[in-house]
Amino acid sequence: MRVFKAIPSHVGFGSGTQLALAIGVALMRLYDLDITVADLAKTIERGRRSGIGIGAFQHGGFIVDGGSIVNSHGEETVPPIIFRHPFPADWLFVVATPQVGAGLSGEAELTAFHELPPSSPETVDHICRILVMKMLPSLIEGKIKPFGEAMTRIQQLVGDNFSDFQRGRYASIASEQLVAYMLEQGAYGAGQSSWGPTVYGLVRGEEQAQSLAEAVRSFVEGKWKSTVFYTAARNEGFYISTSTREAIP
């Protein structure tokens, strides 16, 4: 098997889960195996801490998972998807990846999850209230401003919870400054993706996306070598092409 193009690794895109599931599903199709994506994820040991990557692979859109559940055999199951809704077509994300070091992965990530103390009940209650009372209704009603506010606040609370392992609310000074800059420049919300260093800002329409992306490129020039682009959310799951197009040499 030859991989001609892949998502960058260890920068906050969840590339490991997406690539592993893509290869697994391709092999399932090739050998006509009747295996669910959830069973595949369990086999390749994905989804032990979060079901978001699996849900995004299957369905796309905005996803909330229900956390790990222990079955009757004492085994942790893949976290179930308890909410899924498409993003409005004109909600776009400006994405910036400063080259300032990779986020946690492998043994370092396992150590972090093992050693981190549980979130306080107050923090969990606060995040749940923001999610249920503000974020989800705003998404369903297409209200980008309160959705962005909720997204930003949840990102801050989660970042604070992981601050002992990423030396602050964000993975790096670059990530912190980029989030602040995107908000200053009119993004409706901004945050860090996973362990970073990738960050993103929520905007409406291509004109605002282009403007913010150009501003971010100017902001990082001379500071950090960075990849900056904007994209719409993907509201669909995986797609496997059966094209017989000639392979890339």
Image (spheres, rainbow, N blue to C red):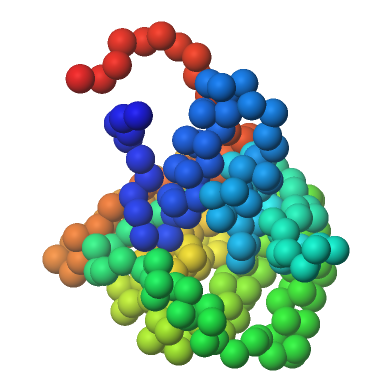
Image-quadrant location for residue 129? bottom right
Q: Nearer the viewer, residue 93 or 40?
A: 40
Q: Is residue 5 above or below residue 11?
A: above
- Whole-percent x, y for residue 165 in the image: 43, 84
Residue sitting at x 44%, y 51%:
16
- Give the residue displayed 63% in from the left and 35% down from the top: 236
The image quadrant that residue 7 belongs to is top left
In this rendering, position of residue 245 left or right of residue 225:
right
- Left or right: 229 as drawn, with respect to 126: left
Instruction: Say which quadrant the N terminus sits in.
Output: top left
Is residue 181 at all visible to an observer of this figure? no
Residue 107 location, x and y as percent? 40, 72
Q: Position of residue 241 (x, y in %)?
A: 50, 19
Q: Is residue 246 visible?
A: yes
* 87, 203: nearer the viewer: 87
Q: Residue at x 26, y 20 (%)?
A: 248
User: Quarter holding the C terminus?
Assistant: top left
Residue 248's place in the image compared with 222, above or below, is above
Nearest the camera: 220 or 235?
235
Residue 48 placement: quadrant: bottom right
Give residue 70's position: percent from left, percent from top: 78, 67
Residue situated furthest left in the rendering: 222
In front: 206, or 202?
202
